[in-house]
Image (cartoon, grey):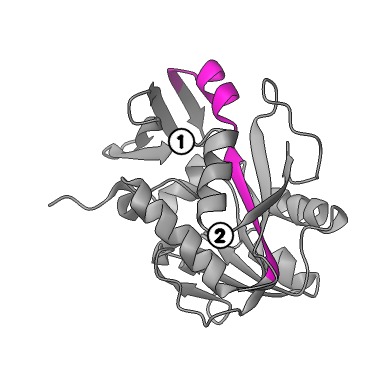
Amino acid sequence: MDEPWYKRAFAREYLELYRHRSPVQGQQQVNQMLAAGLLRGCVLDLCCGAGRHLRPMRDAGLVAFGLDLSMDLLAAGRLGGTAVQADARYVPFGDARFDVVTNLFSSFGYFPDDAAHRRVLAEIRRVLRPGGRLVIDHMNAEVVIRDLKPETTDRRDGLTLKQIRRYDAEKRRVLKDIQYTPDGLPTRHWHESVRLFTPHELDEFLTQAGFAVVARYGDLDGSPFETSTSNRQVVIAQRPDSA
């Protein structure tokens, strides 16, 4: 049986594919979240990758920890002692441990069925303290579908990157095939498959998981969300004070 795409896609080549999602950008986004009052106390950065948000969170004085499935990305970020390798459906932290859980850069929607996505939300709720908040940064479905580029090819530093994209309306997923070809070396192929959630769907999933949706922004800086123009939807959901 083939491995799930998310176990094969997040190797070191991923960092080159998304190199515009850099540590500098991560620092800027953490600064924005701090200024918008989205971060406080003890934080879990769920699906932290190589730590481009986790490191500046800790540098800002937050008690921050990370979790990611990819050992390649954790090793690239040298996150030993600050992050654990684990599946987001099975978070290896105790109940009511965190004030905030962040889930950034469309790291929600990877699994092939919605039961697994509900399991992720249940785990997030479990590890949040009463009154704690989830900051989930997801694509804005309407804009992503409308503006999706079917194919792009980029040349950079002795490397050719070809990406083929489509939207599967039946499964509500953005599908991307990547061809990564260093000069003189064989091409490496992998794909991505991310479930899109409309604002209404995401609110419904969060509410069913026991969260109260308290805000939706167009970016991590707390700017207003506009359905037809915002590239992102940043949703703030709170675990109620009572159990």
Residue at the location (50% across, 47% down)? 205
Magenta-drawn stretch contains 134: yes
Q: Nearer the viewer, residue 238 or 224?
A: 238
Residue 70 occupies which quadrant of the picture? bottom left
Q: Is residue 153 above or below residue 197?
A: above
Q: Amino acid at mark 2?
A: Gly
Q: Total of numbered circles in the picture?
A: 2
Quadrant hosting residue 87: bottom left
Residue density around tag 1, few if under 14, some if 14–19, many if 20 or more, within 10 Å:
few
Task: Tell me if I can see residue 236 in this picture.
Answer: yes
Would you say 12 lies left or right of 200 here?
A: left
Callout in the foreground (2, 1):
2
Please, is residue 20 above or below residue 42 in the view? above
Q: Is residue 140 magenta?
A: yes
> In terms of secondary structure, where does tag 2 sit?
loop
Q: Secondary structure at mark 1?
A: loop
Q: Which residue corresponds to mark 2?
A: 210
Amino acid under disc 1: Gly
Assess disc 2: are there few (<14), some (14-19) or many (≥20) residues with their C-alpha within 10 Å of its C-alpha. some
Q: Distance from label 2 to label 1 (Cα)?
A: 49 Å
